[in-house]
Image (cartoon, helix red, strand yellow):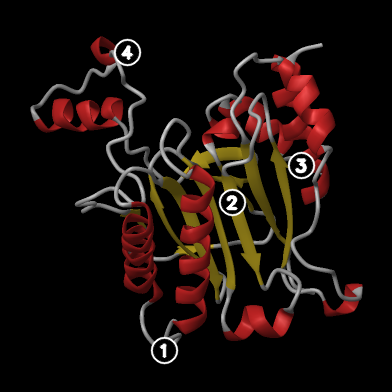
Amino acid sequence: MSLLKIAQQKIGKRFLPAEAAPPEEERPGYRAANLQGLGARTGQEDSFTVAGAFDAAIVQEKGLFFAVCDGMGGMKDGRLASETAIQSLRQSFQAMDRSQDLAPQLERSVFQASAQVEALIGGDGGSTVVTGILYQDRLYYASVGDSFLYLLRGGSLLRLNAEQNLLHQKYLESIRAGNMDPLPLQGLPNGAALTGFLGMPGLDEVDCSVLPLPIDGGDVLLACSDGVGGVLSPEEVAKALQMPTPEEMCASLDAMIASYNRPHQDNYTAIVIQCVSQS
């Protein structure tokens, strides 16, 4: 039996709403579910949170908040780094001033989370992050590292955030130098090496939305670690996100990951948020 199958048996399946759902008539315009698995690893270093998904009053007052943090394997205390980041981000979300622009507040919250991780672990470990707030039918988002944020709209899949790794950095340098052909950079040694992560000394860049993105009924958001986004193709992700419910979307993503039977499958975590039209 493969290590992947053994790990899946140990952790079981988790396609669970983040909070207990209220009666149907009280549901807000968002439905959320999550997926998490060990892969071939012996421990879970990913952490996640969803706040307000099933409380219409909280969504209206504060917004729906989500975050996925992927503790960095091979470095010190990956699980501690991701949990610390999640706790910091959630506290910052609760304290935000909704009368002011949320975009810079979300960006600051990511820097604050990075500083807390660095203070705790001393720069010897860290975590990626992808996080967002759905407020007044608009999405604010931010990320550091190589986690993914996808939007499925009208059957088309869009990646909203950019990876912070050596390959992407070289792409940008090439474009700025006037070379628009990325093909020569394919196969770049250590191209997947991160150039930014929470807890990194001197972190100076967060990929974030400057203006909020309007969200429509029928939109589906996927925030996930690279154990999902780095394994599945955009076509596979789009297919999974066209299932009827978030729980079924998560189950489809999980089945696709399992089908690869990768001997070194990383931890994987996903949050799916389905935006439904208000009646």
Left or right of residue 247: residue 269: left
Residue topped by disc 4? 186
Q: Earlier in the sequence, mark 4 or mark 1?
A: 1
Is residue 138 among the parts visible in the rendering? no
Discs 1/2, front: 2
Q: CA distance from mark 4 to mark 1?
A: 45 Å
Residue 67 x/y as whole percent: 54, 57
In the picture, measured across the screen, residue 75 lies left or right of residue 53, that is left
Identify the amino acid type marked 3: Met
Q: CA distance from mark 4 to mark 3?
A: 31 Å
- The CA distance from mark 2 to mark 4 is 31 Å
Q: Quadrant of residue 72?
A: top left
As helix, strand or loop, the secondary structure at mark 4 comes to loop
Whole-number angstrom distance, CA of label 1 to CA of label 2: 29 Å
Q: Is residue 202 left or right of residue 137?
A: left
Q: Which residue is mark 2?
A: 47
Q: Secondary structure at mark 3?
A: helix
Tally of numbered tags: 4
User: What distance separates the C-alpha of mark 1 from that of mark 3?
Assistant: 34 Å
- Amino acid found under the numbered disc labelled 1: Ser
Kindly check if marks 1 and 3 are in contact, taking CB atoms under 8 A apart as contact: no
Q: Residues within 10 Å of mark 4 (few under 14, many from 20)?
A: few
